[in-house]
Image: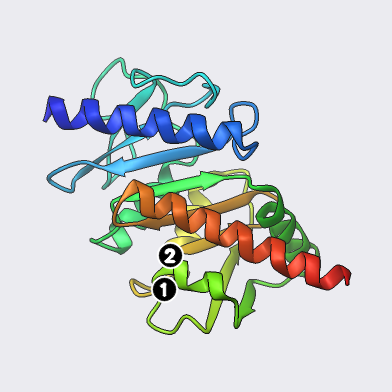
Amino acid sequence: MTRSIDAAGIALAETAAALYARGWMEGTAGNISIRLPGGETALITASGVSKGSITAADVVEVDIANARPVHDGAPRPSAETTIHTALYRLADDSHAVVHAHPPYATATAILAAQRGVDTVTFTDLEIIKGLGLSDPSKVVVPVFDNHAHVPLIADDVLDRIAADAPPVMLIGNHGATTWGPTLDIARNRMECLEAMCQLMMLVARS
């Protein structure tokens, strides 16, 4: 298990640094997790750490059932840990979650919150295929209210997202979250969501 945790920690650090370099995890914002072998715990980035300088030591093993650190004396896990663990509980094939603030997806989440809508629909975009849906002609992305008390967002996720739902979501005035069977796929889906939001905003300006 130690070897698995070490490898997962390195993968989290590398992915976080790459997203930071793109401007998608500014300051200490953003968080990433990986479900560990056995399925009952996950490794997540620690709170308050710049994703541009994060290392494999800046991660925390948490219990998926209650979102609490498994080991005493561990760093404080991300403030959004409960959202990650909610997504793991919803789908057994979810093994990685990425939360970031890519600019177009975040702007789309802000506009959705301003307009009071709880979904954003994309149709007939080639990039939808990157989400791995059975019907890639359309995707309805849920938008969640951005509660200051993050567990309330996690409760909303558990209430609204079905096991077969698209593996992407927006949080109003906040950012985006994606998930998948591997960390690479979860990251790719974040890129696809950002591309969809960018394309729609560019078209709206024309």
Position of the N terminus, as image quadrant, is top left
Residue at the extreme top:
73
Q: How is the image coloured?
A: rainbow
- Give residue 204's position: percent from left, percent from top: 83, 72
Residue 37 found in image quarter = top left
- Give residue 167's position: percent from left, percent from top: 43, 64
> Between residues 41 and 154, which one lies in front from this camera angle?
41
Position of the C terminus, as image quadrant, is bottom right
**Circle 1 — which element?**
loop
Q: Residue at point 30% right, 15% down?
A: 73
- Give residue 47's position: percent from left, percent from top: 49, 26
**Circle 2 — which element?**
loop
Type of amino acid under label 2 = Pro
> Between residues 64 and 152, which one lies in front from this camera angle?
64
Residue position marked by numbered label 2 in the rendering: 167
Q: From the viewer's perspective, is residue 164 above or below residue 65?
A: below
Residue position marked by numbered label 1 in the rendering: 165
